[in-house]
Amino acid sequence: MTAVLGVDPGTRKVGYALVDADGTTILRGIEGMPGLLPRIGALAASCTIEAIALGGGTNVDPVRRLLEQTGLPVHLVDEHETTLEARGLYFRDHPPAGWRRLLPLGLQLPPRPIDDYAAELIARRWLALGNR
């Protein structure tokens, strides 16, 4: 299986998502900076990663240097509004329950970081640009 690894860079943690050429998400996760390279190594051992789509936001330069050590091609992708869109994806997968379902989603925050959902969107953006 060939896939693209979307990466949402951060200062202490990094969201990642493995997305196949059809845009189907294989897996998502969030990793601390020290564990990022070992995690990508494990992913690369289980499938063929054709490229890394890296969001061009916070802490991009140190994360890019780290990712370049993998030997995989790293491509910068505009991550404008991915956090807002990631909230929508998160709530699609995890709809609020109980009394929270009565509140508009725009007034709610996910109960956990959603960097992995932002990474999924970054990978899909790279694929949408015709990169396969």
Image: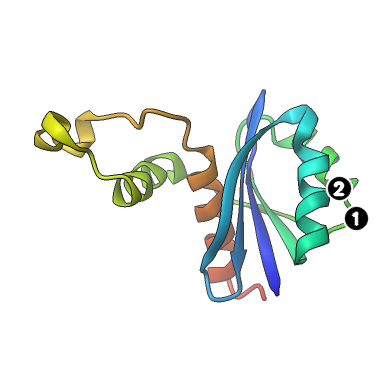
Q: Which residue is mark 1?
A: 71
- Helix or strand or loop: what does disc 1 sit on? loop
Residue 121 visible within the image: yes
Q: Position of residue 106 (x, y in %)?
A: 22, 35
Verify CB contact (< 8 Å) between mark 1 and mark 2: yes
Which residue is at a point 42% across and 43% down the rendered structure image?
A: 81
In whole angstroms, how far apart are the C-alphas of marks 1 and 2? Answer: 6 Å
Mark 1 residue crowding within 10 angstroms, few (<14) / some (14–19) / many (20+): few
**Residue at position x 58%, y 58% from top?**
123
Question: In this rendering, would 94 be left or right of 64?
Answer: left
Element at badge 2? helix
Q: Which residue is mark 2?
A: 68
| Residue 11: x %, y % from top left | 66, 24
Indicate the quadrant containing the C terminus: top left, top right, bottom left or bottom right: bottom right
Asked whether 110 or 97 is in front, the reply is: 97
Q: Residue at x 83, y 50 (%)?
A: 41
Residue 71 position by quadrant: bottom right
